[in-house]
Amino acid sequence: MYDVGVKDSTPKPRRNRAPQSEKPASGPPRLQKVLAAAGYGSRRECEVLIVEGRVEIDGKLADQLGTRVDIGQQQVRVDGEILSVAKHVYYLLNKPIGIVCTNRDPDGRTRAVDLVPPTDHLFTVGRLDMSSEGLLLVTNDGDLANELAHPRYGIEKIYRVRVAGQPDARALKKLSSGIRLAEGRVRVTSLRVKSSNKKSTELEMVLTEGRNREIRRMAAAIGHKVLGLKRIALGPLRLGEVPSGAYRPLEHRELNALRRAAGGRGRQPNRRSSARSQPGKKRASKATTVS
C-alpha cells in the first residue's frame, strides 16, 4: 500500500524545440501543458504525442515542444480527434485489494477507474499495487496530478502497514534513518507503532516520495514481511469512513487544500470543475505503485 515509484517506460522525446526567437516569454500556455490539462497524460507523455506528429493546431502539424496554443482561439486535434476542454472531476476512492490502477489492462481485470462514473481520460494520481488498498485520487486534471507528483512539494502519504512479527527498536530505527535499495537510499518521514502481538505489528508510516514497491522492500530489508498495506491519507485528503470499493467527489475545501499543498496557491479551481461536477478527464503523474 505504499507508494511505489514505478519506472516510467514512456520513451523520452527528443527536444525538438521551436527556435528561441519564436518562443514568447509569456502568453498562451505550451501545447504539452494544454494536452496534460485536457487529460492526455503527464507532460512527458504529451511531449511524446507532439514529437511523434500526432498533434495538429488549426490543421497544421505541431511537432515542436516550444509551441504555445490559445485553446480559446485555435483548434487542436490529437490523432484526428478535436481536443475539448472537459470539466475536471475529482473523486476520492477507497481501492479494494485485487483492483489494478493501470488504465490499460490486457487481462481485462477491474481497474480503479471502473469504480467511478465514466469520464474521458480518467486516471489515478499515484498507484497502489493489487495487494494494497486505500485512498486513491481519481481525476482527469493533468495539471494537478503533475503538481502532486512533483518532488519539490514533498506531498505526504500516510499508510497503515501490518508486518509479520515484532520489529525491534533497531529495525524500526533503520526504517527512519534510511535503507539502501537499488535506486538509492530511502527512508520513512515518520513512523509509529499502532499495535503489536506475537504474530504481527501494525505500523503507521509517512512517506513523501515513492519508489516501486518501496514499503514492501523496506520491510523485507529489516526481515519483516508485509501482510497488509492501506493508504489512509494523501496530503490534506483523508480516507475517513469511505467503504472499500466506494468513492465520493472531493469537497471544494478539500480541492483547495490539495491545490495549496501541490503549490498552486494562487489558483482557484475552474468554476466548471467543482467537486460535485460529473465526469470529465485523464491521468498524469509518473506511475507510483504502493506496495
Image (cartoon, rainbow, N blue to C red):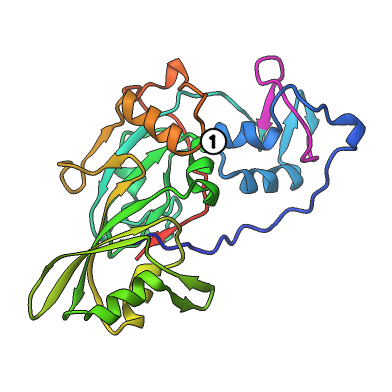
Q: Nearer the viewer, residue 247 or 105?
A: 247
Q: Is residue 155 left or right of residue 63?
A: left
Which residue has dot 1 on it? 143
Furthest residue to the bottom? 223
Residue 225 percent coordinates (x, y): 26, 79
**Image quadrant where residue 170 sits:** bottom left
Residue in view at x 48 percent, y 77 percent: 181
Residue 93 percent coordinates (x, y): 28, 43
**Residue 68 sits inside the magenta stretch:** yes
Q: Residues within 10 Å of mark 1 (few under 14, many from 20)?
A: many
Residue in view at x 46 percent, y 65 percent: 211
Q: Quadrant of the N terminus?
A: bottom left
Q: Which residues are magenta?
A: 62-77
**Image quadrant where residue 40 sits:** top right
**Residue 110 sits inside the magenta stretch:** no
Which residue type does callout 1 highlight? Asp
Q: Nearer the viewer, residue 215 or 52?
A: 215
Compared with residue 132, is residue 166 higher up or lower down, i.e. above or below?
A: below
Q: Nearer the viewer, residue 236 or 113?
A: 236
Q: Quadrant of the C terminus?
A: bottom left
Residue 99 percent coordinates (x, y): 29, 56
Compared with residue 21, is residue 173 higher up or lower down, i.e. above or below?
A: below
Compared with residue 63, is residue 257 higher up or lower down, i.e. above or below?
A: above
Residue in view at x 52 percent, y 24 percent: 266
